[in-house]
Amino acid sequence: MIRRLLLFSFAALALGSCAFAKSPKSLFYLTREPNSVRSFLAHPDKVDILVPTWYLVDSEGLVSGGPNPLVLDTARQHHVPVMPIVVGAGFVQADFHKLLINAAAYRQMFSELIRACKENGYTGFQFDFENVNWADRDALSTMFQEAANAFHAQNLQLSIATVPNAPGAPGETSFDAWLFENWQGAYDLKSLSQSADFICLMTYDEHTRWTPPGPVAGWQWAVSNLDYALQFVPAGKLYLGIPLYGYHWFAGTPIPGTLASPGDKPNPSAQYISTPDALDLARAYGGHIEWDPADRTAWFYFYRDGMREWIFYTDARTFRERYELAKQRGLAGFCSWSLGNEDPEVWDILPAHK
């Protein structure tokens, strides 16, 4: 009898700890699109950190941008920390390389970003530097460490968004080698995590316009990249990327030939699509919503003008699976690109912040 009571007590305790596991913080990216702004204005109490795409830096260290006053006022009223993104050189690889090798230029960037924080009450900034060549890995880490020191000296935070890069080396295909060389290989997670207040692991865009149709963030792909990142980044500093959008694959208009290369060229293409827009297409063309149990994602196809078009997207169930993963792994939070694309039922999943 005593043994049974003890077993019951331990079971109840275990269930209780699962039920009351700490919810991961919700970090949402906000663009200047009206739908994105309206989404934040409607749900500020479900957003723990707001990361707006308000700033750019060029190859000379010149920072441009500024806040949306209505968004900033709403964030203040609802006690939502604002940490804008600064995008590096418009994702142009050669221009960002110029910035990385010019210490005077990137120090000018630090000064301008710190000034923007003080003027607007930002908690800090997030660096979003993508399309960085793998050979610039050490230079990126060095610049980021110096930036973190400058921000921390002013009691400001600095985070960085990184492209997932498991298993840490290029694979068999030439496409994977290209991906590692230009998108994945520049992020030294161990070094970056030592300087960063936190890291946003962008576990989305597994399949894009560069690839055949497939999930935006397939389950095993996301888990593998998370497991790899956790070898270098403490869970308390890591945010799991959860996409709010989808991709729509279709046959694009053939590309006309040139004198050097005559003959039209095929143009299979894909575009971002929001969940509401995806569901509108399903209704219009008779697409039947499917659930992929292996990749734990929603998808469907439909025919238009005799051609099959594919859509993989994030519904509330897809979102919940990844939200629970962040919670189970004890991560600091999740980061979602981007407001305005979401399934409205996502908001029912999230607790309001205090």
Image (cartoon, grey):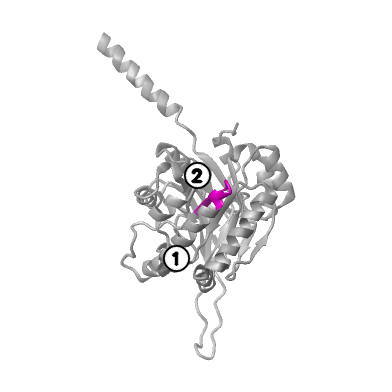
Q: Quadrant of the N terminus?
A: top left
Compare residues 292 and 218 and report the one nearer the observer.
218
User: Residue 322: which quarter of the image?
Assistant: top left
Q: Which of the labelled discs sits on residue 139, or is there none?
A: 1
Residue 208: x percent and y percent? 48, 62
Residue 349: x percent and y percent? 54, 36
Per the image, the residue denoted by label 2 is: 334
x 50%, y 65%: residue: 209
User: Which of disc 1 and disc 2 is earlier in sequence?
Assistant: 1
Residue 37: x percent and y percent? 68, 49
Q: Where 14 falls versus 344 (above or below)?
A: above
Amino acid on which the number 2 mark rests in the picture: Phe
Q: Quadrant of the C terminus?
A: top right
Circle 1: element type: helix
Q: Which residues are magenta?
A: 151-160
157 part of magenta stretch? yes
Q: Where 142 falls versus 13 (above or below)?
A: below
Compare residues 4 and 56 and report the one nearer the observer.
56
Residue 32: x percent and y percent? 67, 55
198 part of magenta stretch? no
x 40%, y 63%: residue: 185
- Name the side, left or right, on which 314 lies relative to 63: left
Label 2 vs label 1: CA separation? 27 Å
- Badge 1 density bin: few <14, some 14–19, many ≥20, Cα 10 Å: some
The mark lying in front, picked from 2 and 1, is: 1
Residue positioned most to the top: 1
